[in-house]
Amino acid sequence: MGMNASILIVDDEKEMGEFFRYLLESKGHKVVVTVSGAEARKAFSKEKFHLAIVDLKLPDTDGLTLLREFKAAQPECEVVIMTGYSTVKSAVEAIQIGAFDYLEKPFEDISELEEVIERALVRATAKKEVFSEKREQVLRAIGLISGKSEKFQRLLMIAEKLAQKNVTILLRGETGTGKELLARFIHLMSPRSHQPFLAVNCCALPENLMESELFGYQKGAFTGAVTNRKGIFELAHRGTLFLDEIGDASLSVQAKLLRVLETGEIMRLGGEEPIRVDVRVIAATNANLEELVEQKRFREDLFYRLDVVTLTLPPLRERKEDIPLLAEYFLSRHYPPERLPKIRPEVLQALEDYDWPGNIRELANVIAQVAAICDGPAVLKEHLPPKIFGDQGRRPLLNESFVEGDDQRAYPLVSSQEEWFADLLERIRLFVETVDLEKGFNLPQFLENFKQAKFYAARLLIERALKLAKGRYPKAAEILKASPRNLRYLHREKAT
């Protein structure tokens, strides 16, 4: 056997375990010996195995139960069942469940045993390579950059394991940390990967529209319902449904979500018969659901239904070692490979020094702004927005007074929003007057840039307000004299 593999032995006969340890370690393999189902499960949860050799009869469980669990948790691991009480029925059942082979004890021919193990390891290695390649392809396809952060790598490893289990998952984390991307990763690494992945933002629609979107409606259920319409739960049948901002769902919607999670059935608006749906639910929030439960704004029974498994995404300030890789990735989305500028070390340092209250989404937006003005071979500090440096490095607008500090660039003193807007209009007028129209001018792109600038300005204000409001949208909305729903929309618009 020309490979070093990790092999798990599960047999309550200690002599048999030591026999396998001697046989396999002498060939360079790592061997973990366990004598019960409980020990085996603990070992299996801690590391990845190429092969598990499992006795059919154990003191606290049976080998077929472990076989099912192992194949669900690590599909790429091969499992060989062995027993001293062989029957044709148990052998057939083991193979049908997914066992690689079925061996009878005692082993009369050691070379035959070695051949079975070698064939199992060859297949396991091939499957691991395919699985690893799929993992990297999925990460690249959805833009989920794993980077160097140990905390984030551990999170991905747990998410990858959970992908194989049909459990409800609650994703927690600050806004912009990539909760939807992680949900997509879990879906694409799961057995449901060839079925639909649908995402719903629970704060994006009014309550009456949210119910019809989620559960559908029957013809005549309300004015305008001229045909039957499937809801998102039905459309996501056999797939995955991602419920973002679950903490903003109304109590009425929460009650119906609880019914689906408990019964696997939905009822269309105006419908009389329940409809069975097979949907894996992944919910996400940046709110404190425990507080919302205490405030009677979130159902306690739904909270416990959602909180089966919780994954918390770290904020970008806790994985700063990943900022260079993330910045380069986002920059590559705006340039063809032959024109991709290099990010100067001092720029990377400035990005790492910034606190990133808007997390990965904010970094993506900053890099998009950089790409809009950088047309040279390198990204310079001058290309970064002023907020990265605080007040330093801001360029004065036209007709503004300014002060100069030692070793600091001038920065403007704007007395009012009206004055700022007047200066902006003047700056636009002067720009337009200098355009050489004889060479042509891309007006649609010009207007699109203004659209992007509008949302960019809104996001900057919202991020400052959220920082002041300690991440609470209602308080930030009060500061900005806007509705929380509108703030969430503007914060996500054009975001990646």
Image: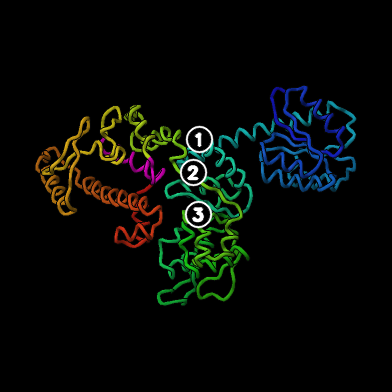
Is residue 81 highlighted in magenta? Answer: no
Q: Residues in magenta?
A: 355-373
Amino acid at pointer 3: Ala
Q: Amino acid at mark 2?
A: Pro
- Label 3 with label 2: CB-CB less than 8 Å: no
Instruction: Give the prevailing secondary structure in the magenta stretch.
Output: helix
Helix, strand or loop at mark 2: loop
Q: Which residue is mark 2?
A: 314
Residue 149's disc is: 1
Secondary structure at numbered mark 3: strand
Locate residue 405, reporting x and y percent. Answer: 20, 34
Question: Which residue, as the protein is rendered here, is positioned at the far front?
Answer: 406
Residue 321 horizontal/vertical position (percent) = 45, 33
Q: Are marks 2 and 1 in contact (CB under 8 Å)?
A: yes
> How far apart, in angstroms, are the residues tagged by discs 2 and 1?
10 Å
Q: Residues within 10 Å of mark 2 (few under 14, many from 20)?
A: some
